[in-house]
Image (cartoon, grey):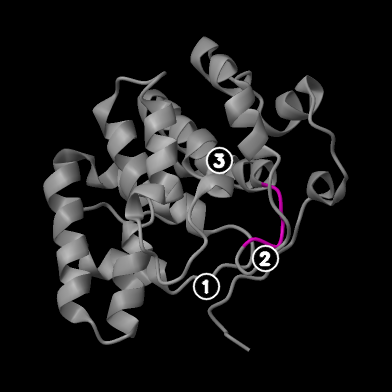
Amino acid sequence: MNTSQRIWNPSSMLLNNVSKDTNTILRYISPESTLERTIVQDNYWQIGAFWGEPRPGHPEGKVIYHIHEVLQNVDKATCNKKLRQQLRLITIIHDTFKHLEEQTRPRTDWSKHHAIFALNFAKLHISDQAVLDVIELHDDAYYAWRATCAGYEEKSNKLLNRLRKRLKGNLQLFYLFFKCDTQTGDKDQSPIPWFEKMMQDEIEVLHF
């Protein structure tokens, strides 16, 4: 057993079968702004949100369940209004286009990564560059950790340096989302302390 693997304790909401309708979206997402309501009413978004079966790291199955879990962590992560709004937008969009991404492994076309599909959708609604950058790069900390575990330090450092260069003053936003996203399902929790250690001089480490 992987002792760093999170034990998944789903809420009663996540154990219910749901239908693709407005009431379900309101229940699991609880949109808080006109922008959020516009996004979740988009049929393209809804198709992706209701996609998914239980799989490693995502025992909850449907993407909308994962979004719900991440949003619960966002509530714990910060009381800062702007930061919370940014985290919510990233959460609502980041994984919603996994059904479109290339399934071949190893990947042959990174333009078909779900983060790129999410970024392209986000650009239709959002002008905040920090939010767009985190959506695009949201898996890079995990990929950097995995590269280190496989002995590819140069690749890991390259990914971390790309985060530093692209995000600059928004590394804290990225870190908070990364932690909110990782502390869900039955994901391995090892990437969190690793990233916190690697970026300890550039982020404020928070516990929630």
Asked whether residue 208 is in view, the answer is no
Up-down: is 183 above or below 87?
Answer: below
Residue 116 location (% of width, % of height): 37, 42
User: Could you tell me which secondary element the residue under label 1 belongs to?
Assistant: loop
- 17 to the left or right of 165: right
Q: Which mark is residue 55?
A: 2
Residue 150 location (% of width, % of height): 32, 85
- Work out which quarter of the rendered image holds the N terminus and state it: bottom right
Marks 1 and 2, the one that precedes in the sequence: 2
Three-letter amino acid code of the residue under disc 2: Arg
Q: Is residue 47 magenta?
A: no
Residue 115 location (% of width, % of height): 41, 46
Up-down: is 125 above or below 18?
Answer: above
Nearer the observer, 73 or 40: 40
Mark 1 and mark 2: span between their CA atoms?
13 Å
In magenta, the rendered stretch is 58-62
Three-letter amino acid code of the residue under disc 3: Thr
Disc 3: which residue: 96
Three-letter amino acid code of the residue under disc 1: Asp
Number of the front mark, 1 or 2? 2
Residue extending farthest right: 17
Disc 1: which residue: 188
